[in-house]
Image (tube, helix red, strand yellow):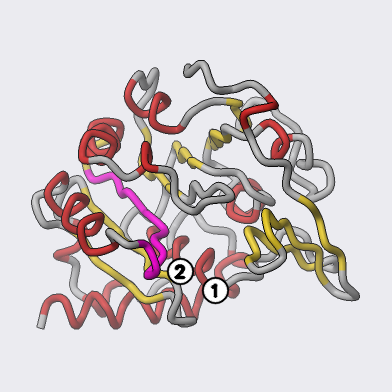
């Protein structure tokens, strides 16, 4: 683990609560995470639902790792609606972890754990492999450089089980956006799928360690085997979006 885990090295986020939702911010201009007050495990932001589209290709994951906790949206969703899955979440900012109770992030137990650490170090010195690795690591300045290198994406591939999926949230405004997509493609021998999240600010890159992206588009319509039926309803539009992108990729 890195030397920069001290509290003083990280910006303290703040929480803004409205009538129907609670949001995590580093600045008032951008939302890092948002939670519905009447349904804390719901995925309230479009890009988080799109990222969960990896379930179309890895429908019954045994092990999921995430880089970036934020308000815990995807972590909470997976904990509730993927009951057979073990989940590890790595977050470098201790001030973010300190807010986990504010956002109803589950306590650590036999199948769920939040780790205070550096995501790049986590994948480089991995102690286990996973079926899906979700990278949504942002700080007050945007996407950290250590989570964008060719070495990082190479390490991500090595952390995956055969057939595993890397899912990366990228911001179109990143000055090296095209380069980052190229790096992911290089690490995964071109087996990537880029999906717009629908609000014109983010894209989600799916990268496969295997041939899952060669699936017939029509085969992604059924509910993933490991996903609880109640959770599947939240993801129908996202699954359709990913399915259309897959069809376009194969055209």
Q: Main secondary structure of the magenta part?
A: strand
Residue farthest to the right?
A: 19
Q: Are marks 1 and 2 in contact (CB under 8 Å)?
A: yes
**What is the x, y in percent for residue 134?**
43, 48
Mark count: 2
Name above or below for residue 73 compared with residue 139: below
Residue receiving disc 1: 46
| Mark 2 surroundings: few (<14), some (14-19) or many (≥20) residues within 10 A | many
The magenta segment is 163-174
On the image, which quarter does residue 172 sit in? bottom left
**What is the x, y in percent for residue 179?**
20, 57
Mark 2 element type: helix
Residue beneath the point at 60% across and 31% down: 111
On the image, which quarter does residue 158 sit in? top left
Q: Nearer the viewer, residue 18 or 13?
A: 13
Residue receiving disc 2: 50
Query: Residue 188 vs residue 53: left or right?
Result: left
On the image, which quarter does residue 117 sit in? top right
**What is the x, y in percent for residue 165?**
31, 49
Residue beneath the point at 37% across and 36% down: 146
Give the Cα distance between marks 1 and 2.
6 Å
**What is the x, y in percent for residue 126?**
37, 22
Name above or below for residue 55 compared with residue 157: below
């Amino acid at each position: 683990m890195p030397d920069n885990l001290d509290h003083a090295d990280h910006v303290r986020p703040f929480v803004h609560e409205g009538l129907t939702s609670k949001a995590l911010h580093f600045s008032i201009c951008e939302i890092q995470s948002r939670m519905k007050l009447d349904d804390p495990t719901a995925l309230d932001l479009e890009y988080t639902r799109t990222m969960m589209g990896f379930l179309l290709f890895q429908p019954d994951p045994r092990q999921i790792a995430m880089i970036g906790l934020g308000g815990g949206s995807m972590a909470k969703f997976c904990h509730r609606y993927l009951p057979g899955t073990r989940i590890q979440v790595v977050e470098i900012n201790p001030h973010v972890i300190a807010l986990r109770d504010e956002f109803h992030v589950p306590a650590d137990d036999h199948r769920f754990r939040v780790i205070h650490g550096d995501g790049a170090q986590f994948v480089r010195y991995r102690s286990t492999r996973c079926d899906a690795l979700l990278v949504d690591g942002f700080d007050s300045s945007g996407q950290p450089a250590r989570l964008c290198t060719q070495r990082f994406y190479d390490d991500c591939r090595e952390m995956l089980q055969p057939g595993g999926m890397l899912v990366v949230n990228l911001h179109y405004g990143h000055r090296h956006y095209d380069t980052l997509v190229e790096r992911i493609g290089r690490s995964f021998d071109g087996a990537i799928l880029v999906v717009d999240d629908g609000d014109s600010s983010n894209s989600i890159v799916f990268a496969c360690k295997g041939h899952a992206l060669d699936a017939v588009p029509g085969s992604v319509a059924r509910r993933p085997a490991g996903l609880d039926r109640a959770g599947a309803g939240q993801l129908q539009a996202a699954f359709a979006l990913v399915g259309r992108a897959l069809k376009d990729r194969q055209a």
